[in-house]
Amino acid sequence: GETIQPILKDLCEWGTNYQNAIL
């Protein structure tokens, strides 16, 4: 469980940056 959380966090941050880049 603890090994996947950093990955999910990175995906969330990447998704936010991606949306900001489009908007």
Image (cartoon, helix red, strand yellow):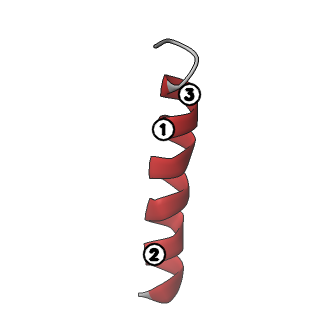
Query: Which amino acid type corresponds to the residue marked 1 in the rendered image?
Result: Leu
Q: Which residue is mark 1?
A: 8
Q: Which mark is residue 20?
A: 2
Query: Which amino acid type corresponds to the residue marked 3 in the rendered image?
Result: Pro
- Residue contact between numbered discs 1 and 3, judged by CB atoms under 8 Å: yes
Residue toward you, 7 or 22: 7
Residue toward you, 11 or 17: 11
Above or below for 6 versus 14 = above
Residue 15 percent coordinates (x, y): 47, 62
Mark 1, secondary structure of its residue: helix
Categorize mark 1 by other alpha carbons within 10 Å: few (<14), some (14-19), many (20+). Answer: few
Which tag is nearer the camera, tag 2 or tag 3?
A: 3
Residue toward you, 22 or 5: 5
Q: Earlier in the sequence, mark 1 or mark 2?
A: 1
Q: Which mark is residue 6?
A: 3
The residue depicted at 52 percent of the width and 72 percent of the height is 18
Above or below for 14 versus 7 = below
Above or below for 16 versus 22 = above
The residue depicted at 48 percent of the width and 38 percent of the height is 8
Query: Which amino acid type corresponds to the residue marked 2 in the rendered image?
Result: Asn
Q: Which mark is residue 19?
A: none
Mark 3, secondary structure of its residue: helix
Mark 2, secondary structure of its residue: helix
